[in-house]
Amino acid sequence: MHAINIISGISMLGVLIGSAALIIILSVFNGFEVTILSLNGNFSPEIQIEPRLGKTFDPNTPFFNSLAKDPRVFSFTQVLQEKALIKYNGRPFIGTIKGVSDDFLKTPLLDSIVQVGSFTLKSGDQDYAVIGSEVQNSLSINVRDPLATMEIYSPRRPMGNVSDPLSEFVVRSITPSGAFAVGQDFDDMVVAPLRFVRQLLDQPVDVSALEINYKKGADLDAIQLAMEKAIGKDFTVKNRREQNTELYKTLNYERWFIFMILTFVLIIAIFNIIGSLTMLVIDKRKDIAILTSLGANKRLIQGIFFFEGMMISITGCITGILLGLGFCILQQQFGLVKMGSKMSMIDAYPISLRFSDFILVFLTVGVIAVIASGISSRLSIKGLNDIKQDL
């Protein structure tokens, strides 16, 4: 009997730990998704319009002008960007130069992504650039030095004198005012005023994209749908998730892979119940025979052992969910588990609780428990006639 109780306790403990781990892991991945959304939200627009073919397009059309005058629009930014060679103190780096119009600075919380300096693009007639952390680290740029200047190289259009390689590039110098960190998709960028990049790329009219942010309360899904219908097939309209599809796919794949691995751990833990209930059936053979002699049918006997298996599983599951919830709340409040490095924006593992995760874990444990308890309960009536004959 002691052995049966110990095995049952171990099975319940396994379900408890597995359920708690599932809640914690799912909440951490939710937290990463929310954090990445907020970080990208400081840099990525709510709606982005790009040409379906080619790199640039003319934004001076009646439709685009009407979008800029829409009263729901908070900021309407013209963007011109291209790959370029960046040099500082003779050291080269291939990055992206991104020219933005004045409305870009309306983006809220831009200062929150700045690590050093400030997000300044203009001061009087002087143009400044804000560089990504990858550019800063690769070139060892001191943004606090007012005399530090970067040289931006871009191929000349049309090509110059082939015999003179330098004539094939347009070169412009600009002073960095700050450095930002968002993610690997953005940290190789140099953000500069649109007029500076127009001169560099020799593009006086065309743009690469239009970035639009709307005022609070705007129905972005409805706006995107209406825009896609009106804009035609020559352009693509993307929301924030569609602008970073690979990133979100990777997060979701990792989330579900971890969920599947922990589910297999739960299956092993719950199927230990079969072992403990099998031992209990062997121990209670005489009691089972007596019950049947008193009128209990096979269905009642099966129900008793099925209920016990479900009770062990569900008790472990609910306790594990509550422990996981408690840990997640403590992590949210106090940041108990750190990420192992002092980051400017994320110090501890982020947590985001979703009710759907609790339902998912409970249903997962429930389905596995029903299967395991069903197998165990069938063992309780196996050979029942032989037991009665022995008595």
Image (tube, grey):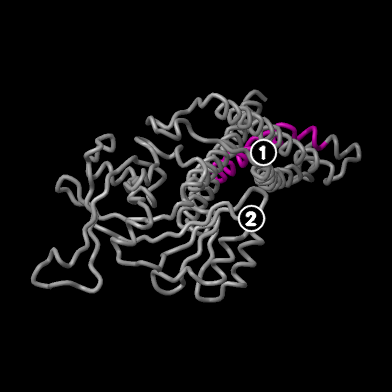
Work out whether residue 368 or residue 230 is closer to the camera in this orientation and state it.
Answer: 230
Task: Tell me the amino acid under the disc marked 1.
Answer: Thr
* Residue sticking out furthest to the front: 124
On the image, which quarter does residue 361 sit in? top right
Q: Residue 105: where, in percent of width, then height?
A: 46, 47
In the rendered structure, the answer to whether residue 270 lies left or right of residue 294 reads left
The range drawn in magenta is 262-289
- Quadrant where the C terminus lies? top right
Q: Is residue 88 magenta?
A: no
Q: Main secondary structure of the magenta part?
A: helix
Task: Tell me the amino acid under the disc marked 2.
Answer: Arg
Residue drawn at (47%, 66%), measured in percent from left and top?
Answer: 50
Q: Is residue 372 visible?
A: no
Q: Which mark is residue 72?
A: 2
- Quadrant where the N terminus lies? top right
Q: Is residue 268 magenta?
A: yes
Q: Is residue 137 above or below residue 45?
A: above
Task: Identify the residue position indicated by label 1 in the image.
Answer: 278
Element type where label 2 sits in the image? loop
Work out whether residue 17 or residue 327 is closer to the camera in this orientation and state it.
Answer: 327
Q: Is residue 331 above or below residue 68?
A: above
Q: Residue 172: where, in percent of width, then height?
A: 24, 55
In the rendered structure, the answer to whether residue 151 lies left or right of residue 180 reads left
Residue drawn at (20%, 73%), measured in percent from left and top?
Answer: 159
Element type where label 1 sits in the image? helix
* Mark 1 crowd level (few <14, some 14–19, many ≥20, 10 Å Cα): many
Residue drawn at (50%, 64%), measured in percent from left and top?
Answer: 49
* Residue sticking out furthest to the bottom: 233
Q: Residue 167: where, in percent of width, then height?
A: 15, 66
